[in-house]
Amino acid sequence: MIQRLFIANRGEIALRIIRTAHRLGMTTILGASEADRQSWPARVADEVVIVGPAPSAQSYLSVDAVIAAAKAARADAIHPGYGFLSENAAFARAAAEAGIIFVGPDLSSLAAMGDKLMARKVGIEAGLPVVPGGEATDKDAALQRANETGFPVLLKAVSGGGGKGMKRVDRVEDLSHAIDMAMAEAQASFGDPRIYVERFIASGRHVEVQVLGDGESAIHLGTRDCSIQRRFQKLVEEAPAPAIPQEKRAAIEQAAVNLARHLRYRGAGTVEFLVDVTSFDFYFLEMNVRIQVEHPVTEEITGVDLVEQQLLVADGQRLSLTQDMVMPTGHAIEVRINAEDWAQGFRPSPGRATRADWPAGEGVRVDSHMGTGSEVPPFYDSLVGKLIVRGATRDEAVARLTAALDRLSIEGFATTTDLHRAIVRDPRFVAGGVDTRFFEGLARG
Amino acid sequence: MTIDLPLTPEDVNEIAAILDGSSYDRLDIRTSRLRLRVQRSDGGWTQQWSIAEDAGVEADIVAAAGAIVIEALPDGVEGIPAPLPGTFYRAPQPGAPPFVEVGDVVGPESVVGIVETMKLMNPVHAGCAGRVTAICVDNATMVDGGAVLMHVEPA
């Protein structure tokens, strides 16, 4: 059994992993940057190792620094969380060479899904439908692709995830500048400037399926709907995806399991689909081969601790769950509270929390590393916490979310709390089943 | 393995449930590492966490970002401020030519640089029209919000 677990991440997910690891009796070692040495996860980890200075390129994104720190700490296993090095095949390989278990899928799955172009190819091999598009190595190639598929197009980072480096382009004259920005973001976030071009599908829902595999068998834990996004950054996620006919939902879930089986997938993963709002036809987008930010909504309706499942499979155990044992009940919704001033174009708002009152009580879960006095450094992602609510029905979950948001109060920097108060009262959200254009139609103020 | 376990979300909700059936409005818990307050609010409950006081904490919090720095500008010159705190880049990507050089003429909408904050690339617009007379910050340098990045002699 894994005894010493190294956590190569920060923020709420580091704290989340520490909690489960402690429950399983593991000793936790947090690899933190200089900027995070006084953070909440650093306070509750059994040991803290400084992996480097504040900028993530020299700390959380440095394969050499993280592996050296994990070796020095005599770790048996590394949990990479999400973002940073979580889907980096070179990192997984370096861990294996150092004799440390990488809590994630095999190198073959990382290689197949880490690159979105390869993912498309493998998805097609597994029999999944995909959106038209392809790679663009330079501006001329991008322009040619865009002309083939027609505007608007979507630029995506080949190594991307989490909406970084993703741009919608409506007009040919905007393409050159958008490519510059997308390549710069892709380079900064993933160390790989390559992008590709895909037809932009205006009226779709973003539906994803949580899967678990042990290399032999694979199961799904139902759907999540993440259609409420702004510039491809998810704002609200819920499970199960509402208002989808049962047979269509089953087909989407089966497609996800087919892909996991095709890959002989080990660990927790998420298969993302674009779903047509009227026909419910679906297209495979990509597979995230890590724990997702929005994993708690699945945990809330299934009762399965996904981080625990990751650790057990990484430890070489077979899945103890079978498909029949997973019986989702009720409805769960998560909202992301970001340190951003949404009234000022979502401008990042680093600072120090002079007050952090999070809601509590029945059906309410908060995954956050933000206490009173906690710092939001300017170096990292703006997520300061996730408010998750559960109800017996979607209506009950929405009512609970409305009340919980009214009790949430963070002072010291701007947050997206008010935005979520507007979303949860929007009649389209209350009805359920919105598409990815929801945000554009949100009534302001 | 820590004896002083962090309280889990389930623990917090159990505390709230116990308080719900009582006449108490608030409970404070202090461990060696953390303080938690669970209190009544708007017909529900809130949780407030803080890290237990420690000499090291105050020292580090001084590094709070986001301070607006007002710098003196030479007469007849306008400053282009950083729109927010972050890392200033002069070019769209490593190895590419800078957006502007000293002597270039810019308009209010001209992009003169990028500030990377929380992994987002924020374009810096000149905000005024004129000729760039100085570039005050080196490439890839951390800047405060409002810090003057360049000087412009108005047209």
Image (cartoon, grey):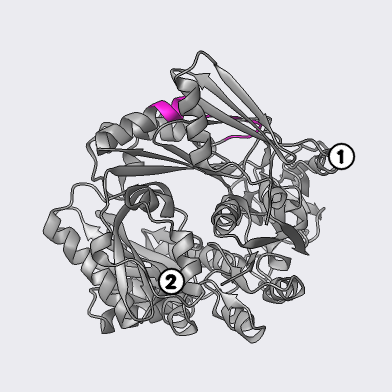
Q: Is residue A425 visible?
A: no
In the image shown, does A130 or A109 lie closer to the viewer? A109
* Mark 2 Cα shell of 10 Å, populated few (<14), some (14-19), many (≥20): many
- Where's residue A128, x and y in %? 24, 75
In the image, what residue type sits under mark 2? Gly
Name the residue carrying label 2.
A267
Q: Residue at x 69, y 40 (%)?
A: A374
Boundaries of the magenta span: A403-414
- Where's residue A149, x and y in %? 28, 71
In the image shown, does A389 or B153 lie closer to the viewer? A389
- Where's residue A53, x and y in %? 78, 61
In the image, what residue type sits under mark 1? Ala
- Where's residue B84, x and y in %? 67, 44
Q: Is residue A1 visible?
A: yes
Q: Secondary structure under badge 2?
A: strand
Q: CA distance from mark 1 to mark 2?
A: 41 Å
In the image shown, does A331 or A402 lie closer to the viewer? A331
Name the residue carrying label 1.
B55
